[in-house]
Amino acid sequence: MPWNFPIFLGLSPLVGALAAGNRAMIKTSEFAPQTADTLTEMITKQFTDEEVVVINGDVDVATEFTKLPFDHLVFTGSTPVGRIVMRAAAENLTPVTLELGGKSPTIVHDEFDIEEAAKRIAFGKGLNAGQICVAPDYVMVPRGKVDSFVSAFAKAFSARYPTLAANKDYTSIITERQRDRLLENVEDAKAKGAKITILNPSNDTFDGTRKLPMYLVTDVTEDMRVMQEEIFGPILPVIPYDTLDEAIAYVNNRDRPLALYYFDWDRARGEKILNETHSGGVCINEVVTHVAVDDMPFGGVGPSGMGHYHGKEGFLNFSKAKGVVRKGKLDGNQFVGAPWDNKMFKLLVNFQLRRFKKP
């Protein structure tokens, strides 16, 4: 169970598993202990330990958890940890569903209104302060519109979050370690020549909190950490492009992401994006909310994960189709088995040959 959406991402696969007739074990996140306690209390009231059991503990407990001989193992988290989980599951030949992450790109076409795009992107990037596996990780805008996008995004973000430090609508970073990682990424980009635009509408100070302002990063280069690893926080690189084919090539030259977002009212170009890119899911003129469509399959591809759940696909994912053959009173094998020169076998062969004989 991940810490960023512990209830949703903990119970969503559980629904599919129980619907398919399974029992289940849930390992909670040590970074959300109060939520873990609440979830444990809720589940123990509704299920016995023979049906659903909740396990709490730190990374050592999680390590042992993944070594158990499950019939199926679901993990949501980073790609590096996903590799560790899959390696442990392989010892028991346990099939896995991995919902990982990566750098989910956003492409804005030149004909799409830049202010409207910025408003919609700011909605998704501001949620949970960017700590979402499908948060827009970087934005590609037409060359010449970078400054316009930055201004429009700042306006949209400030309208949603006029203050930050004391604003209950704006989320803190989960730990000091994660906050420091994000700040180091900003400093790394700045040291390598990036321009940093800090969005802090009321000029709040963040002493004694784990909150961060929103950072827009322009003039980015490939050697910057913000372009090499999943950001998972309030940092958004903005990258210019000249042609749609160039933007598609940029995305395709990188690991396949969990989500891809494209802004364009032209349906044909939207189909081009769908046909020429690979990602776990896609939103056209929208970001993030495809995860909330509970009857649509959700999952990654390649480094962003494997397997699907939600809705019917969740039921199938946690099921094992069992093929069954029932034989009647007539044993047809007696007519087609050895000795192969028996009359019935010859009749059947001749019948089939006549069927497929060309006129």
Image (cartoon, rainbow, N blue to C red):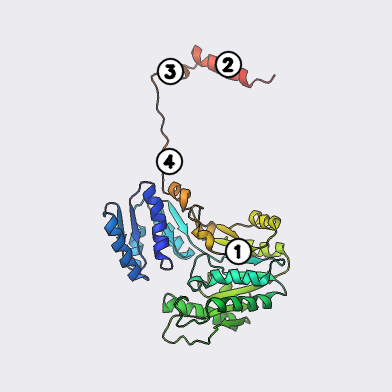
**Percent coordinates x, y for residue 148 in the rendering:** 68, 77
For this view, does 287 lie left or right of residue 169? Answer: right
Residue under label 1: 254
Residue receiving disc 3: 334
Residue flagged by tag 1: what amino acid is it? Answer: Arg
> Between disc 4 and disc 2, whose residue precedes?
4
The residue that appears at 59% across and 68% down in the rendered structure is 120
Q: Is residue 264 above or below residue 159?
A: above
Disc 1 residue crowd, few under 14, some 14–19, many 20+, Cα 10 Å: few
Q: Which residue is mark 4?
A: 321
Q: Is residue 161 left or right of residue 8?
A: right
Residues tagged 4 and 3 counted as in contact (Cβ below 8 A)? no
Q: Residues within 10 Å of mark 4 (few under 14, many from 20)?
A: few
How far across and how far down the image is residue 333, in percent? 44, 20
What type is the residue that disc 2 sits on? Asn
Residue sitting at x 41%, y 18%: 330
The CA span between labels 2 and 3 is 18 Å
From what the image shows, is residue 274 above or below residue 204? Answer: above
Residue wearing tag 2: 350
Would residue 323 be found to the left or right of residue 224 on screen? left
User: Whole-Å distance between the Cαs marked 4 and 3?
Assistant: 29 Å
**What secondary structure is found at the residue carrying circle 1?**
loop
Q: Amino acid at mark 4?
A: Ala
Q: Nearer the viewer, mark 4 or mark 3?
A: 4
Q: Is residue 346 above or below residue 153?
A: above
